[in-house]
Image: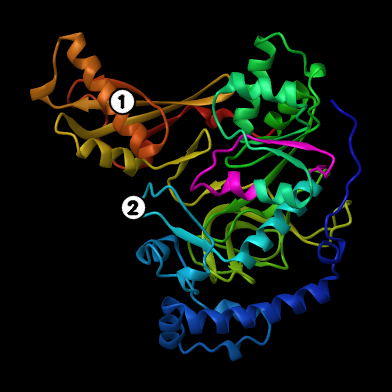
Amino acid sequence: MTQKKKNHIWNPAAEKMARPELEALQLQRLRDTMGYAALHVPFYRKLFSKEGISPDDIRSLPDILGIPFTTKQDLQEGYPYGFFAVPLKDVVRLHSSSGTTGKPTVVGYTRKDLDIWSELIARLLYAGGVSQEDIIQISFGYGMFTGGFGLHYGAEKIGAAVVPVSSGNTNRQIMIMKDFGTTALVCTPSYSLFLAESIEEAGISKDDLKLRFGLFGGEPWTESMRRQIEKRLGIQATDNYGLSEVMGPGVSYECLEQKGMHLAEDHFLFEIIDPDTGKVLPPGETGELVITTLTKEAVPVIRYRTRDITRIISEPCACGRSSRRMSKPSGRTDDMLIIRGVNVFPSQIETVLMQMEETDPHYQLVITREGALDELEVHVEIKDAFFSDEMRVMNELAARIARNMKNALGLSAKIKLVEPKTLQRTEGKAAHVLDMRRHLKNR
């Protein structure tokens, strides 16, 4: 394990702002956002008119509780540009979600949005120990997913050398890591562990590498997994959180104390609600995270239900930042699965199967962890008319289903064909999903 580096802060004026000053700033920005959204976003204009809401009604931060929530379904119904507050000529970047539960949610960024995003990533990187002296290898995919590009421009902002290697091709990743002298790694935690295994199998010692820091996100991971990553790669590993609907990575981030993720409270307003009743929970209680953007120009969102389960930590952090923190999300309120950093919904599997004449929409997802990476096996029932004793015929069908799954999910899955009426018919997530990873606990 490398010697711990002292906490350093990218923007002390913002990150160490006194609470009264911060809350006054939040209130002013909330009022501005309310007026801006009412003027430029048809959804909010209609909502505020229907509910009799005026930006002038916001006289204190708790007044936001009178505003209805915004949901992912609302954003999907506005596909593609229904939630945009600016004309497309002012949008300089577009990203979107994977769209596994219907239409994707599309988000845009003005030049100012990208500047703020880079600022928040700079805070994230500094909090995780990285500075302009580092060489950062970004092993997230570059594309509609916000992770790759989000981290890239923030890394350039702090003056670090960026290696945009993207995802995949593990042997090349290791070669670049060794030859380029990579000091900081950005990827999913599971992929970092897979890299560690591959490095060991190649006979390369962690001492042969210059890695010092790992900044991981995109999927849940346990404290025991963190300790294993740190030991095997010889780094300090920090977590970060974000979602495309409000910006991307940089919404919250761990410092080297590793005791919760600091919330970017000057740019977002955070609440914890009871996911069943929608009521705001007392400080420290665990519930669903709700986020309001305070400075977003292209796509402002108000009281967005993230579906992520977490809690907010108000106690001061030893690093000196004044922001509150959030714990690692413990799960989601919907039925989404995260496999190798990819969002997978059982309903998407069903959609693929229903589009094929040979298969019934009866299936089971079996998720295991082989080494460092998750593995997905899909058990699929074949219709009587298409079931065959010929192995070649069944293998060809399984390969076709696998291709369709890959196209729909962006994730490779092993397909196991089973005879008709052999899978349990009980409805619900428990019947469709056998997640063998659930025994992994935070220890």
Residue positioned 19% across, 30% down in the render: 359
Query: Residue placed farthest to the left in the image?
Result: 385
**Residue 13 is covered by the magenta coloring:** no
* In the displayed structure image, the side of residue 337 where residue 260 appears, left or right: right
- Residue sitting at 19 percent across and 20 percent down? 419
Q: Which residue does the numbered mark 2 point to in the structure image?
A: 102
Q: Nearer the viewer, residue 344 or 178?
A: 178
Rendered location of residue 202, percent (x, y): 66, 10
Label 2: element kind:
loop
Tag count: 2
The kind of residue tagged 2 is Gly
Q: Residues within 10 Å of mark 2 (few under 14, many from 20)?
A: few
| Cα gap from disc 1 to disc 2, whole angstroms | 23 Å
Query: Left of 150 or right of it: where is 374?
Result: left
Q: Earlier in the sequence, mark 1 or mark 2?
A: 2
Quarter of the image for residue 166 reads: top right
Q: Give me the residue at 49% from left, 60% from top.
A: 107
Residue in view at x 68 percent, y 47 percent:
240
Along the horizontal axis of the image, is 167 left or right of 202? Answer: left
- Residue 407 visible in the snapshot: yes
Q: Nearest to the eye among marks 1 and 2: give it.
A: 2
Please give the label number shown on residue 288.
none
Q: Where does the magenta region start and end? A: 128-151
Rate crowding at label 1 as few (under 14), some (14 to 19) or many (20 or more) other CA atoms within 10 Å. some
Give the position of the N terminus as an image quadrant: top right
What is the x, y in percent for residue 405? Answer: 33, 33
Residue corresponding to mark 1: 379
Quarter of the figure with residue 351:
top left
Q: Position of residue 430 (x, y in %)?
A: 38, 37
Q: Quadrant of the C terminus?
A: top right
Q: Amino acid at mark 1?
A: His
